[in-house]
Image (cartoon, rainbow, N blue to C red):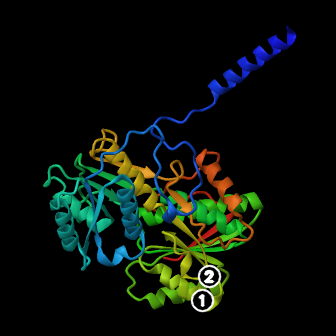
Amino acid sequence: MKKMIALFLTMLLLAALSACAPQAESGTEETFTVPSDDASYVYTPAEDAEPLPGGATIALAAESGALESGPEALLWQGIQTFASQFGYTAQSYPYGASGAASAEEALRQAAESGAALVVCRGEEMALALFEIQANYPGVSYLLFDDEPHNADYTSYAMESSVHSVLFREEEVGYLAGYASVAEGYTGLGFVGTEEVPGVVRYCTGFLQGAQAAAQRQGEEVSMRIWFTGDIGDAGVVTSRMVEWYNNGTGVILASGGQLMQSAVEAVNQTGARAFATDWDQNALGERVLGSAVKCYNTAVQRQLYKFFSGGAAWDQQDAGQTERLGYTDGSVALAATTWRFNDFSERDYERLYEQLRNSELEVTAYSDLDTLPETPAVTVEIQN
C-alpha cells in the first residue's frame, strides 16, 4: 500500500511540474537558436499552423548591382526561399542607375505588376515610397532600414499598407565590441560614413560592448572614432586606417558605403584586423576578424509569413508601423560561417547572446555623439 501511495504522489508531482513548464504558443517556433548563419536560414512554422494559400506574387524592387551581394541579395534570397517553400511567385524589379527617380520607377513597376507585396530597402526606396505609397490600392509594402520620408527629412508618413523594419544596430555593434576585446584587442577603431543615427548606433554599441568586456577582464582599452563624411577619395580613408594600425589600433569596425574595402586594403598592408557590418563579409579575406550582421534573409522570411498568414495584409499591430528587430527575435548576429576568433569561442558567443537576450546585460541606443555612454575602461578619441 505504501508503494502505491508513493507512486501516486510521484505521478501527481510530475503532472504539476509539467503544468508549470513553459509551453510554446501556437503558430510560433518552439525553440530559440542563437543565430550564426543568416544565409542558411529557412523559416519553419509550428506544426499546428494553418497552411498558407500560396499563389500570390512577392516583388523586390532594388538597384541591379545590389542583387549580387549584400542586404538586397539576402532579401532576394529570403523571398525566393519563402516563395519556393510556400507556393508563391518571386519577381525582382532592378534598376540600373542610382537615385530616387530610378528607384521610384522600379517601385512603380513592381506595384503595377499585380504583386500582393513589394519589398524594398534603404533611403532611396524610402523617398520613393513616400511619394507613391497611397497610389496603388491593394498593394502592400515591406520597407527595410528606413521609414518613408521626404527629401529634407521634414515629413514622415506611412500608409496602413506599409510596414517598416529597422534593426537595432547598437545590439549587433555590442557583439562586435565585446568579441574584439575578449579576443585580446585593446586598441580599437570605428570608422563610419555619415554621422547618422544607424551608423552612430553601430559605433556606440561597439563602445558599450568593448567596455563590458574590458571591465570583465580588468583591461584598459582605447578606441579611435572617425566619421569620414563625403570624402570622395577611398585612398585617404585607407591611409588613415593604415596610420591607426601602425599606431596601436588592432581592429577596426567599418560601417557604411565602401569603407570595408578600404579596411581590407589597410589590413592587407599592416597585418591587422577588420570587422565588417550589415552582412557576412568574412569571405573578403583571413584578415577580416568577423562580421556583425543584420539577419536580412531571416527577417524577410518571418515578415512574409506574418503577412500572408494574416490574409495578405498587415495586421493592426504592423499596418503603418515600424518594427525594430534585435536580440529578442534573433535578428542580429556575429556570422560564424568562418570563425576566426581564438580566445572568444562560439560557446562564449552563444552565452553572451543569451545574456543579452535575457536582459542580464543592457545595451542603450544613442542616435548621436553628443551624449556618449560612460566607459571608464575605454578611452575614446574622436578624430572628426
At horizontal 57% and vertical 45% (from top left) the residue drawn is: 31
Tell me which corner region of the image, top left, top right, bottom left or bottom right, holds residue 131: bottom left
Mark 1 nearby-residue class (10 Å; few <14, some 14–19, many ≥20): some
In this view, 170 is above or below 181: above
Residue 50: x and y in percent read 38, 39
Mark 2 nearby-residue class (10 Å; few <14, some 14–19, many ≥20): many
The answer to whether residue 284 is left or right of residue 157 is right
The answer to whether residue 154 is left or right of residue 363 is left
Tell me which corner region of the image, top left, top right, bottom left or bottom right, holds residue 289: bottom right
Tell me which corner region of the image, top left, top right, bottom left or bottom right, holds residue 194: bottom left
Task: Report the amino acid beneath label 2.
Answer: Arg
Residue 113: x and y in percent read 17, 61
At horizontal 30% and vertical 55% (from top left) the residue drawn is: 88
Distance (Cα) linking label 1 and label 2: 7 Å
Dot 2: element: loop
Residue closest to the eye, 65 or 220: 65
Asked whether the viewer can see residue 369, the reply is: no
In this view, 285 is above or below 182: below
| Residue at the extreme top of the image, as rendered | 1
Dot 1: element: helix
Residue 147: x and y in percent read 31, 57
The answer to whether residue 1 is left or right of residue 331 is right
Residue closest to the eye, 210 or 109: 109
The answer to whether residue 114 is left or right of residue 233 is left
Residue 243: x and y in percent read 59, 87
Residue closest to the eye, 17 or 380: 17
Task: Report the amino acid beneath label 1.
Answer: Asn
Q: Name the residue under label 2.
A: 287
| Residue at the extreme right of the image, as rendered | 2
Q: Name the residue under label 1.
A: 268
Q: Is the Cβ of the residue at disc 1 closer than 8 Å to that at disc 2?
A: yes
- N-terminal label among 1 and 2: 1
